[in-house]
Image (cartoon, grey):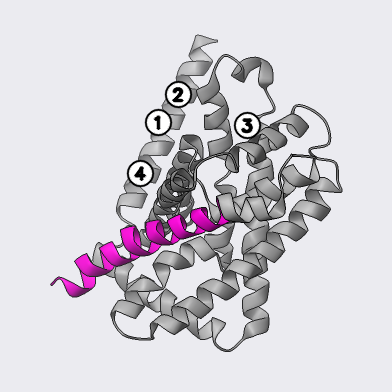
Amino acid sequence: MWGFFFVFLLHFTIFVTIIGIYEIMSVNSPKEVIESAVTVGKNKVALSSGNYGKFAILAMLAGIYIAFGGILSLTIGFGFPEITANNPSLQKLLSGCMFPIGLILVVLLGAELFTGNNALLIPAYMKKHYGAWAIIKNWTLVYFGNLVGALAFTYFLVYQCGLTATDPYHSAIIKVAEAKVSMSWSMVFLKGIGANWCVCLAVWLALSSRSFVGKMLGCWLPVMAFVALGYEHSIANMFFIPLGIMEGANIGIWQSITTNFIPATLGNIVGGAIFVGCAYGYVNLLNK
């Protein structure tokens, strides 16, 4: 048994070392990353200013992918109550490890995610490739596209499929949803900053890698961290809160909007646009 374990550990170490060396050789410089962000931002604004059909599909797909990550996170994170009851950090870790599949799909397959666009549209704006109205238009359209996708997936492929109809998932999603609307406005806002700071750092890390594995890891680590820490992501909440309501949580729609979605969205904008887009745009584009 120990011989098998030693051989496995040796092979795993060699594999990780090879991947590490490969990734070191496949990393873009900060200047290349910001140039990529400028190009991506220009393309996203062009798409939301012309091809509305394609843009709508990509926005809805992003909402679906994030909701998919949400149900996977809920299923795995709350699926071992006997183990996690006395190990609360383990539940957070399990949920955090599962949720990043949503952003990985968005980045690698291509989709329009509001929170990612909060940062990606800023560098090109700082270079004056377009004005503030183009950003507001893009963010507004993609936000509601994400909402449609997330709600459709949540209703048809989660609620109607009975994925959370029984415990521990039924009780868990009600508890999660009610907790999200029970915090103070300022707390949700601050947690919104933390969430999208992490998400946009994940997008930046994905831009810094030239490989499939590197992009996946770049998306995975910061997103796992924000979920484990309990930060508030407005698009993820388009899954968690509506599903909680469907399952009987004592929450009103207007209450959800005013106590969670508004402060979380504003916090997400600050975390992504200012702490990532503006910060790296200033350092790598303007402050030369």
Q: Name above or below for residue 109 compared with residue 160.
A: below
Q: Nearer the viewer, mark 4 or mark 3?
A: 3
Residue 270 shows up from this direction: yes
Q: Amino acid at mark 4?
A: Gly
Q: Residues within 10 Å of mark 1 (few under 14, many from 20)?
A: few
Q: Amino acid at mark 3?
A: Gly
Specify the label residue 20 is tagged with.
4
Q: Nearer the viewer, mark 2 or mark 3?
A: 3
Q: Position of residue 137 (x, y in %)?
A: 52, 79
- Residue at the limit of the structure toward the bottom, as seen here: 50
Question: As drawn, is 134 to the left or to the right of 150?
Answer: left
Q: Position of residue 234 (x, y in %)?
A: 55, 54
- Say whether residue 283 is magenta: yes
Indicate the secondary structure of the residue bearing disc 2: helix
Tell me the quarter of the image containing the C terminus: bottom left
Q: Of label 1 and label 3, which has the lower sequence position?
A: 1
Q: Nearer the viewer, residue 179 or 49?
A: 179
**Real-space Cα separation, disc 1 to disc 3, in angstroms:** 28 Å
Q: Which residue is mark 2?
A: 9
**Real-space Cα separation, disc 2 to disc 3, in angstroms:** 27 Å
Q: Which residue is mark 1?
A: 13
Q: Residue at x 53, y 40 (%)?
A: 183
Q: Amino acid at mark 2?
A: Leu
Q: Name above or below for residue 131 compared with residue 285.
A: below
Q: Position of residue 63 (x, y in %)?
A: 64, 60
Specify the label residue 77 is tagged with.
3
Question: As drawn, is 181 to the left or to the right of 229?
Answer: right
Q: What's drawn in magenta, residue-wise? A: 260-288
Q: Nearer the viewer, mark 1 or mark 3?
A: 3
Residue 211 shows up from this direction: no
The answer to whether the residues at label 4 and label 1 have Cβ atoms under 8 Å apart is: no
